[in-house]
Image (cartoon, rainbow, N blue to C red):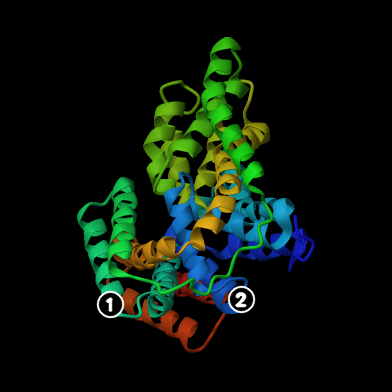
Amino acid sequence: MPDNHACSPWQVFLIFLRLGLTSFGGPVAHLGYFREEFVSRRGWLNERSYADLVTLCQFLPGPASSQVGIALGLSQAGYRGALAAWLGFTLPSALALTLFALGIARFADALPGGVLHGLKVAAVAVVAQAVWGMARNLCADAPRVTVMAVATCLVLLVPSAWAQVGVIALAAVAGLLMFKPSGALAHEPLPIGISNGAGVCWLVLFFALLLGLPLLAELWSSQALNLFDAFYRTGSLVFGGGHVMLPLLQAQVVPSGWVSNETFLAGYGATQAVPGPLFTFAAFLGASMSGPLSGWAGSLLCLVAIFLPSFLLVFAALPFWEQLRGNVRMQAAMQGINAAVVGLLLAALYRPVWTSAILQPTDFGLALVALVALMFWRMPTWLVVIGCGAAGGLL
């Protein structure tokens, strides 16, 4: 890895820990928090590079927001930075859900519903700010605005993870046909320091575990191995974020008798009440397991298993992604893709962010105040989130 990293792993951990404590609202809102923190506030990368990184993580299976965080940590402090970013962003919700599973804290019952609703309203403002900021930079002319609008409509008409992947692919074709960069555009590479050979090794390891773990689980009867296989496979095959993993995980843990359906649904409800990635639901399930492996050991094993594919895929893809981004034809495709990514965020701003949060005039008013506070008063995102939660409890 290069020696000129901007942050130490400890600094990366603290930055992402604050985000892990305050990033409510799901994966789309997380991308908004990240943009405000790392593009607008810290300047770790520019708007175009951030959009390119989001696009890459949208293509990969697994939690896109966590993968963006892993890549950002990697760019600042190498492999240790990637681990520090993931730990900081994941630890708060993983600990809360493990404690909830163990019965020490009844988080979902203890927090008033009005506070949870206020946090959803805050997510509206955060995502709206991200959409506006990215649209100004990435949709600067009529053709790209058109791509953005078409992408938004298609995703709203066909609400599925595969539709999102299809829209991005169509936008790439549209970019090749509509945009003709005259030469290499200004390109800000992420200083990742991973060679092509290392990228291939990480990819081989990803597939070796994906194909080999089921065989090992068949040969050796072990609850730990069976759990690791089930959660690794889920993390490897889920496109579209945390909500999409629900049926896959339910099919893995409920029929096998590891977790009752009532416990499963209670944990998923509690996951909506905590900040950070939805994939930390795995920590709740691991802690709730029946059998010899449960509690803290089960929580850690399931959490590592479901996130491990994200690390391997990000490490495998980034070296080749950096080379592709410098290609002129790829840059034409990326202009279309980046406009489509703004469209995907705009669609998500409407559903589920807006439709689940703006239910009455007071909700709209609170979201408007939060948006003004973010965009014009330049208040910190975490303070606006806490303020919305408090206002939701009072209203």
* Displayed quadrant of residue 219: top right
Looking at this view, is 395 or 92 the one in front?
92
Looking at this view, is 141 or 111 the one in front?
141
Side (left or right) of 293 relative to 149: right
The quadrant of the image that shows the C terminus is: bottom left
Residue positioned most to the bottom: 376
Which amino acid type is shown beneath numbered disc 1? Pro
* Displayed quadrant of residue 287: top right
Return the residue at label 2.
43
Return the residue at label 1.
361
- Secondary structure of the residue carrying tag 1 is helix
Side (left or right) of 78 relative to 391: right
Q: Is residue 122 above or below residue 1?
A: below
Residue positioned most to the right: 3
Residue 334 point in image, percent of width and height: 40, 63
Which amino acid type is shown beneath numbered disc 2? Gly
**Residue at 55%, 83% in the rendered image:** 379
